[in-house]
Image: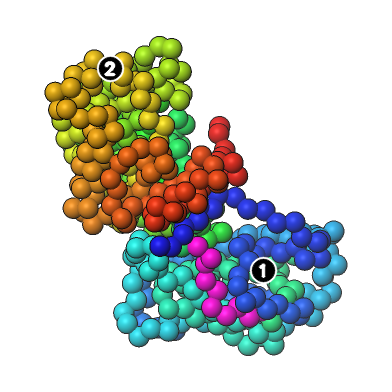
């Protein structure tokens, strides 16, 4: 078993004379004290054939970023005292990037969606202090992209001159501490435009966060347009202007992939599904039940009728229809905050349980197995919330990834069950707007 970490936010307190823009701090980092500036003709040279288009685009973005970032040193005077040293500094004319492998390179986007634990993100970077070319080497285009990100963080601006005060720089085999470094965005309670999401993806890529957990739908709204089930968004979204079309999803996934980010889509089930009742009330128990606090963790109340064969079939087809349109090997099926009183009070659920002779837990397990079987057919791994392991008797595939979110105290209990875990405890960082 390997442990995955869900990184939301980190902060470090450093002395003023040691503040710099590297985040996260590379392994095996060696810094000097020599000033070096970029030549006005600075360029990035790719030292291999058949470079994929998204790497070429990343190189172009790197050069634009270096020219326009304008970040000044975080010291008193914001670099004013560096002016003399900058004027006398040698110039760096170019950065050469190369691949260690002779195999035809895959695109950054292809590398970014490989199964967790198999992605190669390591790189080595050298920036001499004598003005000779800088070099960046990696085993994959994804590693080169991570190295380019680090390279951009080493430079500051003073009156239009891009410079570093830390040459020579040597980074040997910088690798991530965790294969999963994620950020989750809920677009059901609050709708975010595609432009907002892409701006978020940019920020994630700058600090090497590699997983975008897209909690796209919930009880409050269903903003995802699914060609096979167009009625869900048509009736469940906040408005016709707050819907993600299939083209929008493709744009977001492509934008993320080009920045080394895998998109994990989550369709939370069987709870958090009240919005489905706007188009399919037959599948939802305790829809809009009052007082909501007795039927849900937050309003509005409403959960999928998991004991119903028709609802199980509907949900399985729904998840399959979405999962087949996104390239990630991971797909979230939820499983958090299931309210059992909702089912106790729902006459149809009680009738379905009685006719089948099953308990609620047995029905839940069959419901989950059905949805996960559809993911297995697509070669995808299910991701669930911790309650599926700690609060319910549900059969999960051995490969399932479990997100620990309620408390960091629960991580060991989930790990003891031999599941891969994403450590995302709300007692560390949980932002609600």
Whether residue 87 is visible, yes or no, is no
Q: Secondary structure at mark 2?
A: loop
Q: What whole-number distance in Å separates the C-alpha atoms at marks 1 and 2?
A: 62 Å
The quadrant in which residue 261 appears is: bottom left
- In front of the other: 401 or 273: 401
Which residue shows up at 58% across the image and 68% down it?
Answer: 150
Whether residue 10 is visible, yes or no, is yes
The answer to whether residue 375 is left or right of residue 77 is: left
Q: Secondary structure at mark 1?
A: loop
From the viewer's perspective, is the residue at label 1 or at label 2 nearer? Answer: 2
Q: Around disc 2, counting alpha carbons within 10 Å, would you say few (fewer than 14), some (14 to 19), or many (20 or more)?
A: some
- Per the image, is 175 magenta? yes
Q: Which residue is mark 1?
A: 155
Q: Which residue is mark 2?
A: 346
Relative to 254, residue 306 above or below: above
Q: Around disc 1, counting alpha carbons within 10 Å, would you say few (fewer than 14), some (14 to 19), or many (20 or more)?
A: many
Q: Please identify the dominant SS of the magenta region.
A: strand
- In front of the other: 57 or 143: 143
Counting from the top left corner in percent of width and height, residue 243 is at 35, 33
Which residue shows up at 77% across the image and 66% down it?
Answer: 18
Relative to 219, residue 138 above or below: below
Task: Look at the image and give the residue range highlighted in magenta.
Answer: 169-178
Counting from the top left corner in percent of width and height, residue 184 is at 47, 45
Counting from the top left corner in percent of width and height, residue 395 is at 28, 45
Counting from the top left corner in percent of width and height, residue 383 is at 36, 48
Q: Earlier in the sequence, mark 1 or mark 2?
A: 1
Which residue shows up at 38% across the image and 26% down it?
Answer: 339
In the displayed image of the protein, which residue is found farthest to the top?
290
Quadrant position of the N terminus in the picture: bottom left
Which residue shows up at 52% across the image and 61% down it?
Answer: 208
Quadrant position of the C terminus in the picture: top right
């Amino acid at each position: 078993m390997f442990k995955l970490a869900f990184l939301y936010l980190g902060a470090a307190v450093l002395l003023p004379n040691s503040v710099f823009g590297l985040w996260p701090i590379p392994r095996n980092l060696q810094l000097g004290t020599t000033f070096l500036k970029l030549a006005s003709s600075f360029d990035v040279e790719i030292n291999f054939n058949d470079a994929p288009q998204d790497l070429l685009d990343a190189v172009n973005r790197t050069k634009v970023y270096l020219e326009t970032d304008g970040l000044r040193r975080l010291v008193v005077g914001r670099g004013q005292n560096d002016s003399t040293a900058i004027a006398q500094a040698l110039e760096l004319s170019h950065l050469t990037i190369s691949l260690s492998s002779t195999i035809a390179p895959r695109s950054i986007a292809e590398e970014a969606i490989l199964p967790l634990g198999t992605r190669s993100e390591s790189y080595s970077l050298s920036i001499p202090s004598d003005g000779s070319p800088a070099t960046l080497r990696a085993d994959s285009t994804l590693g080169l992209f991570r190295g380019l990100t680090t390279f951009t963080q080493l430079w500051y601006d003073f009156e239009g001159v891009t410079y570093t005060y830390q040459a020579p720089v040597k980074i040997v085999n910088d690798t991530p501490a965790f294969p999963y470094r994620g950020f989750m965005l809920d677009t059901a309670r609050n709708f975010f435009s595609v432009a907002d999401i892409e701006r978020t993806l940019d920020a994630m890529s700058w600090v090497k966060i590699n997983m975008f957990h897209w909690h796209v739908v919930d009880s409050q709204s269903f903003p995802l347009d699914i060609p096979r089930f167009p009625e869900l968004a048509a009736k469940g979204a906040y408005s016709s202007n707050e819907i993600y079309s299939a083209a929008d999803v493709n744009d977001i996934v492509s934008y993320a992939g080009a920045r080394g980010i895998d998109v994990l889509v989550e369709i939370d089930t069987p709870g958090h599904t009240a919005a489905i009742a706007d188009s399919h009330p037959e599948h939802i128990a305790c829809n809009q039940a009052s007082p909501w606090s007795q039927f849900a963790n937050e309003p509005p109340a409403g959960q999928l009728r998991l004991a119903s064969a028709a609802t199980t079939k509907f949900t399985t087809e729904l998840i399959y229809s979405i999962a087949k349109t996104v390239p990630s090997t991971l797909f979230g099926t939820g499983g958090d905050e299931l309210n059992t009183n909702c089912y106790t009070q729902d006459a149809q659920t009680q009738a379905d349980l009685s006719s089948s002779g099953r308990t609620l837990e047995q029905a839940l397990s069959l419901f989950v197995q059905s949805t996960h079987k559809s993911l297995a057919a697509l070669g995808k791994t299910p991701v669930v919330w911790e309650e599926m392991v700690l609060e319910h008797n549900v059969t999960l595939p051995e490969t399932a990834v479990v997100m620990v979110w309620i408390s960091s105290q629960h991580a060991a209990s989930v790990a003891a069950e031999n599941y891969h875990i994403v450590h995302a405890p709300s007692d560390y960082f949980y932002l609600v707007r």
